[in-house]
Amino acid sequence: MLHWEIMGLRAAIALLMLIGAGVTVLVGHEVLTPTEALQAGPVAVEIPAHDGILLIAGRLYQAGAIRSRTGFVMLAVFRGRYLKAGEYEIDREATTLGVLAQLEAGRVKQHVVLQPEGATVAELARALEAERLAPSAAVRRVAADPAFLSTLGIEAPSLEGYLFPDTYQFVRGMTPEEILTRMVQRLRAKTGADITTRAAARGLTVHQLLTLASIIEREAVERGEMRTISAVFWNRLKMRMPLQADPTVQYATGKERRALTRADLRIDHPYNTYRNPGLPPGPIASPGLAAIEAALDPAPVKYLYFVAMDDTHHHFSATIAEHNAAVARYRLARTR
């Protein structure tokens, strides 16, 4: 009787081992084979903070990033590493091991955000909201928060002009403060530590330099004209003539890049450089390095006026008579 019991026990153990081997092979296949979704292309999945391993496995399975929740959990427990929250774009053809490695490394999706030369805080805020990185209203609020500006050492009413125009990569979950701080730091890195000294040599504070550079940036289309446009503004400043820069009125009226009316040019606003001589209270956009350099090094010319000849070039004049003639000439050409 004992002999048959031993034989039965051995058979049961052998059966269990066979089943276990089969399960291992099956799980191993599921772990080492990309899902149909990943064979077709990358898969997006968002892992919230504080999710446990079972919830993470469930989210990955629902998104089509893994074949087996059990296989993912077993592999994660075996490796014993921390899985990081965030927004992921799982690589095409990734196996469960590859998915796990991506979460362990925290290789989250990077959102590319472009802040072009001449862009405003409002335009940046809309771009960040479009990428679902931060609400537009929150970005604008933080950019004008005196306490936040103080932490950056900026004495200005807002970060307008202090956000360096460049291509950035941000990840979802960053705060508006973190995003804006990075852009201010980029400005300081690009302009160099001597920017205060260089501005002072021209009789300007850094704030005034960025203000002038931002107007040059918005007026110029061709970089080759920046130093000449800068010279026009410098000559007007020295003669205490109003700058009469349309972009400052666009900023005052909120029209951004749209055409102005005669009524707009008469608006009572600190940024209306048709009514107020000197520089406006602050920058109107993000100037690039070329515009900043042009503000520091204007061309050695005596021009006081310029008018657009076409969408890219301007005609420069030293006298009002020459300027009026140029205005009439180019306006007539546009009506033909």
Image: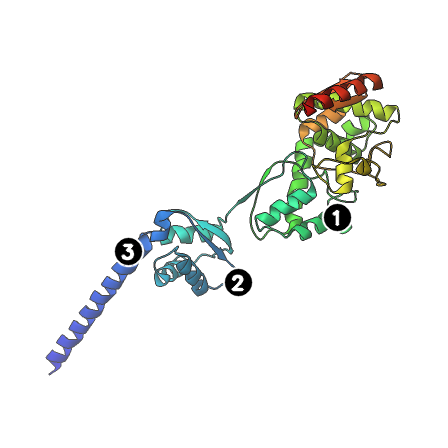
Residue 210 x, y percent position in the rendering:
75, 33
Q: Which is more toward the observer, 183 or 326?
A: 326
- Name the residue at the bottom extreme: 1
| Percent of width and height locating residue 267 | 83, 40
Q: In which quarter of the image is the N terminus?
A: bottom left
Residue corresponding to mark 2: 50
Quarter of the C terminus within the rendering: top right
Question: Is residue 221 toward the left or the right of residue 319 in the image?
Answer: left
| Residue at 48% in and 51% down | 88
Q: Crowding at label 1, few (<14), some or many (≥20) Cα neighbours within 10 Å?
A: some
Residue at 64 percent across and 36 percent down: it is: 165
Query: Type of residue at label 2?
Result: His
Residue wearing tag 3 = 29
Sort mark 3 into few (<14), some (14-19) or many (20+) by Cα contacts within 10 Å: some
Q: Which quarter of the picture shows residue 62?
A: bottom left
**Which residue was labeled with disc 1?**
144
Regarding mark 3 in the picture, which secondary structure is present there?
helix
Dot 2 and dot 3 residues touching (CB under 8 Å) = no
- Which residue is the extreme one toward the right? 240
Question: Horizontally, is 20 left or right of 279 in the view?
Answer: left
Is 304 on the left-hand or right-hand side of 52?
right
Count of numbered badges drawn on the protein = 3
Whichever of callouts 3 and 1 sits on the residue coming sooner in the sequence is: 3
**Front residue of 275 and 291:** 275
| Mark 2 / mark 1, whichever is N-terminal | 2
